[in-house]
Image (spheres, coloured by chain):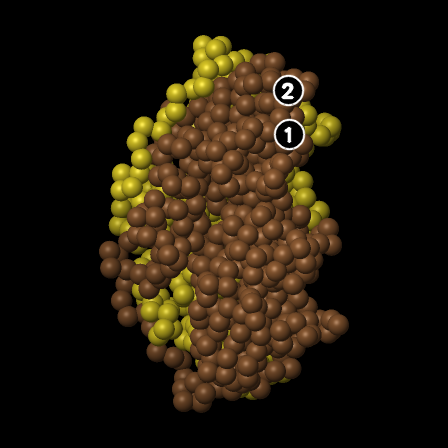
Chain colours: A yellow, B brown
């Protein structure tokens, strides 16, 4: 079913389209040097000591649809503007924010302390200065809310998929501190607690902690941003972002998972007799251009572009379909495909006004393939509508996202078509 | 001469030092939950639409020593504050700036054009919108000024090594555009020209262009920052940063290198009869803590940390010496070791007030090893003093940097000791 690899080579075969696009301008300019657009110098005549964006750039976080202004102000739903993100790193200023109703606290790093206690031989308290003296690791990881959702009512890629972001995180492996503290026999989980007004806490299995959990103080080369956990956050790579406790102040070693507020109310899957945690985010991808809420800017050659990621490891393959899934073609992976990180893909496409249904699906290093909505619903024994509304009760809405391009150039969410 | 691998394992053997450090605090706290440092909420009670740093963070670019205020204002010498960079990515707001005396221009991206002309079959002009429709690549690359210099008069790691930075760059492979334009037989170089007042131009060999040169419009997930070339810069990975022409507006295909202003005045190596270009930056590393201009904050366990990079490809090994080069130990590579990118290393060390001489040296994937000053000087047939002042006339001061730690905890540049 898969066509041969398509990408740059294919693009070159379509050079007529590109030449047409560019030569229109070149012909009128007769190969003269174009007039420079640099009409003035920096208004202040200086380079800022801490640099800022061009005045022409206006990207901002997106308020969640239906969020009241107050809710946005309280950061219940500030989304990454995915369409405007370039490459794989999310600028820290545009990282989505979800704080469960509490303001980001203002924390003086000199006053902040991390306590490790519970089932340990030696309880330990660390200052930030002490943590930063220790061996560190730097890794590029995505963070995605488990509710990041292909919603039929959300006709915009930022609204439907904007609760994900990717940064270089730097910090101390928590395993290192636990070895110093001496984990007692029988301890099998940690409970990590944050320092915001709501004191969000989350249980994390010790096996995961010893594998790759870190206490992150760095984000994209500088201290973690306030709304992302300054000065210290737990980083639990590949898991639901709710595990990566922000403003972390306390880690308790315990023998079983604790049912903290968020687990009781939302972040577990429940049936009549029991409730259980969900951990790893599945393989997921989404086309960010052309995508719902946008318009085709004209006819001709376009790069279809998007992001893929998986809690299961590195992305190994991304496929794109322009005919609703009848045929699939390999997309080009255009950046580093790091484990548990956003991975940029691209696919050369020519749009001449035809109707199209654009889909992407990814495969991770474990061989896990992103499911269609039908496959996802069948797995959970649900109708597609029900699967979309609660994802089988477990969140993790990683179904393939179709975008319908109409002949007038408008683009809409076609998840239920 | 190399001791067995040292790193996290070694750190754990030294746990007494760490326990001493941390238990002091834990003992007084009796393993109680520490008082949170979160004394208030965000002063505005909101999450910024485009987020900002914590009010407690003050890192800024460093004016070059001896630079007049005006020179800094004109951005002749704004350096990356290397000591404060965490991980491998340099925050865009802290990327060093060197503009050869011209203000960064203010360019409206809708007005900007790129012309490709000279020895081509079809001259082409592109708008930014057209470039962003094309297949792109995202890569993490360092940019380093060829004059970035281990200077005996510069007793501070920012001053001596701060003309380097590392970002994720996204853009269009220039080779793709040249294939569209049709490179004529005999064309062997390009000349790229920027749009600032001085119209900086640089010749780049076509072989390099076809390999990995890109037209970058993205830096760390968002548009290139104004002082780094907004809206478009040439990115010539691994070469002297002077090749990566900012605010690029014109690319001319030519049959030989042009001697543009910067080549004539500074950026070539010359003897009595000829002048030649220098391209690739050699393997280089520097310890950023503990380093010149800093003080040891106390005794006990510390992570020696720093950055390594090479124009020759990925960093494969970093070694650290604490005794002036008598013995060397493998450092731990703590982040992704991507080709032609800053690579973070760390090394566990205990300081109990002894004098020490700290050195790092790196090896890249080609097997190139960073030289000592003596090796560097011998290669060029110069005295060490002369080698430091002009690097054999070619810049590229990649000699090993020694930092001397005195028993009082002060740290100084020992490049000539």
A351 in relation to B102, above or below: above
A9 in relation to A339, above or below: above
Q: Which mark is residue B183?
A: 2
| Alpha-carbon span between mark 2 and mark 1 | 10 Å
Point 56% across, 67% down: residue: B416
Image quarter of the N terminus of chain A = top right
| Residue A27, percent from left and from top | 49, 10
| Residue B129, percent from left and from top | 45, 26
Q: Chain of mark 2?
A: B
Q: Chain of mark 1?
A: B
B88 in relation to A44, above or below: below
| Residue A222, percent from left and from top | 44, 58
Tell me the quarter of the picture where residue A231 sits: bottom left
- Left or right: B330 in relation to A275: right
For residue B150, say whether it is visible.
Answer: yes
Q: Secondary structure at mark 1?
A: helix
Query: How many numbered discs?
Result: 2
Q: Residues within 10 Å of mark 2 (few under 14, many from 20)?
A: many
Q: Can you name the residue that lies furthest to the left here?
A: B44
Point 38% across, 79% down: residue: B34
- The reply to whether callout 2 and callout 1 are in contact (CB within 8 Å) is yes
For residue B19, say whether it is visible.
Answer: no
Q: Earlier in the sequence, mark 2 or mark 1?
A: 2
Point 61% across, 82% down: residue: B14
Q: Which mark is residue B206?
A: 1
Q: Secondary structure at mark 2?
A: loop
- Left or right: B230 in relation to A167: left
B212 in relation to A263, above or below: above
Residues A32 and B52: in front is A32
């Amino acid at each position: 079913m898969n066509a041969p690899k398509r990408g740059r080579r294919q693009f070159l075969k379509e050079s007529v389209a590109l030449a047409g696009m560019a030569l229109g301008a070149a012909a009128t300019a007769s190969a003269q040097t174009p007039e420079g657009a640099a009409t003035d110098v920096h208004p202040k005549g200086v380079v800022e000591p801490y640099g800022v964006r061009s005045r022409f750039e206006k990207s901002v976080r997106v308020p969640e649809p239906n969020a009241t202004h107050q809710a946005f102000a309280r950061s219940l739903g500030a989304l990454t503007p995915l369409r405007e993100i370039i490459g794989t790193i999310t600028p820290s200023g545009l990282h989505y924010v979800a704080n469960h109703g509490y303001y980001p606290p203002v924390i003086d790093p000199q006053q902040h302390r991390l306590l490790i206690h519970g089932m340990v031989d030696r309880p330990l308290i660390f200052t930030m200065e002490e943590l930063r003296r220790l061996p560190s690791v730097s890794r590029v990881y995505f963070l995605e809310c488990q509710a990041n959702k292909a919603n039929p009512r959300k006709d915009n890629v930022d609204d439907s998929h904007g609760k994900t972001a990717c940064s270089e995180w730097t910090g101390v492996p928590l395993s290192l501190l636990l070895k110093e503290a001496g984990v007692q026999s029988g301890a099998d989980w940690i409970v990590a607690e944050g320092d915001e007004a709501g004191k969000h806490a989350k249980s994390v299995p010790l096996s995961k902690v010893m594998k790759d959990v870190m206490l992150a103080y760095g984000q994209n080369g500088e201290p973690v941003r306030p709304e992302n956990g300054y000065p210290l956050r737990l980083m639990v790579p590949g898991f639901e972002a709710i595990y990566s406790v922000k403003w972390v102040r306390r880690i308790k070693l315990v023998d079983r998972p604790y049912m903290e507020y968020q687990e009781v109310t939302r972040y577990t899957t429940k049936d009549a007799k029991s409730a259980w945690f969900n951990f790893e985010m599945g393989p997921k991808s989404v086309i960010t251009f052309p995508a719902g809420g946008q318009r085709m800017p004209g006819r001709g050659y376009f790069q279809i572009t998007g992001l893929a990621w998986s809690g299961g490891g590195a992305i190994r393959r991304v496929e794109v379909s322009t005919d609703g899934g009848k045929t699939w073609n390999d997309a080009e992976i255009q950046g580093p495909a790091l484990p548990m990180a956003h991975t940029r893909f691209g696919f050369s496409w020519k749009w001449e006004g035809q109707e199209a249904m654009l889909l992407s699906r990814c495969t991770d290093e474990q061989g896990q393939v992103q499911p269609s909505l039908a496959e996802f619903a069948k797995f959970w024994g649900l109708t597609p509508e029900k699967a979309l509304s609660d994802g089988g009760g477990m969140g993790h809405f990683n179904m393939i996202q179709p975008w319908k391009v109409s002949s007038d150039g408008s683009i809409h969410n076609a998840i239920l078509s």
